[in-house]
Image (tube, rainbow, N blue to C red):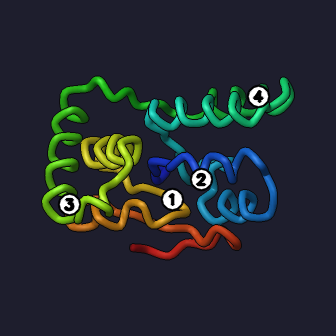
Amino acid sequence: MTAQAYLLDTNVVLFLLRGKQVGETIDSTFGFTTGRSTGIVSVVTIGELRAIAALSGWGEKRQSTLRHLLFQIVRLPINREDILDAYAQVEFNTKKELSPSETMAKNDLWIAATALAAQLPILTSDGDFSSVRGMGIDVTVLDAKSGKPRHL
């Protein structure tokens, strides 16, 4: 049986990293540690996580835990032609559909483009990807308090 793959948004990786109840619920629901599902991240997420660690003053133990977790997760670069083309498509479509005050953050655009090009569903705990639903990107939003999924 092939494991279901998910593109993990930065907030989901943080929940898994913290290992508290929400992270444990996410892991038990999707089975990342058992191999039932595969977690994949954009290199953009890795950059965001490293910035969060630096800005938050994470100690060596927590940074080591982050490195260990990221070592286990498949990374997708953003310099692939299909992802670059998808980025242009996602940015064009969101700018066409959203008002200037509603535009997606650049990092979220890259994550959405990665999901579109790689044909992966996004797993997130915020509504930042609601504007990409009509582009063929499946988005599962997790409740930030319980970790339980609901589809956008």
For label 3, the residue is: 135
Rendered location of residue 148, percent (x, y): 62, 73
Query: In whole angstroms, how far apart are the C-alphas of marks 1 and 3?
Result: 17 Å
Answer above or below: position of 151 versus 62: below
Compared across the picture, whether 47 is left or right of 96 comes to right
Q: Residues within 10 Å of mark 1 (few under 14, many from 20)?
A: many
Query: In whole angstroms, how far apart are the C-alphas of marks 2 and 1?
Result: 6 Å
Query: In whole angstroms, how far apart are the C-alphas of marks 3 and 2?
Result: 22 Å
Q: Earlier in the sequence, mark 4 or mark 2?
A: 2
What residue appears at the point 63 percent right and 65 percent down from the top-left corner?
A: 29
Q: Give the numbered dot on residue 71.
A: none
For label 2, the residue is: 12
Q: Earlier in the sequence, mark 3 or mark 4?
A: 4
Secondary structure under badge 4? helix
What residue appears at the point 55 percent right and 46 percent down from the top-left corner?
A: 10
Amino acid at the residue labelled 4: Gln
The reply to whether the C-beta atoms of the residues labelled 1 and 3 are less than 8 Å apart is no
Amino acid at the residue labelled 1: Thr
Amino acid at the residue labelled 3: Met
Amino acid at the residue labelled 2: Val
Q: Nearer the viewer, residue 76 or 53?
A: 53
Compared across the picture, whether 142 is left or right of 145 comes to left
Rendered location of residue 42, percent (x, y): 44, 36
Q: Residues within 10 Å of mark 4 (few under 14, many from 20)?
A: some
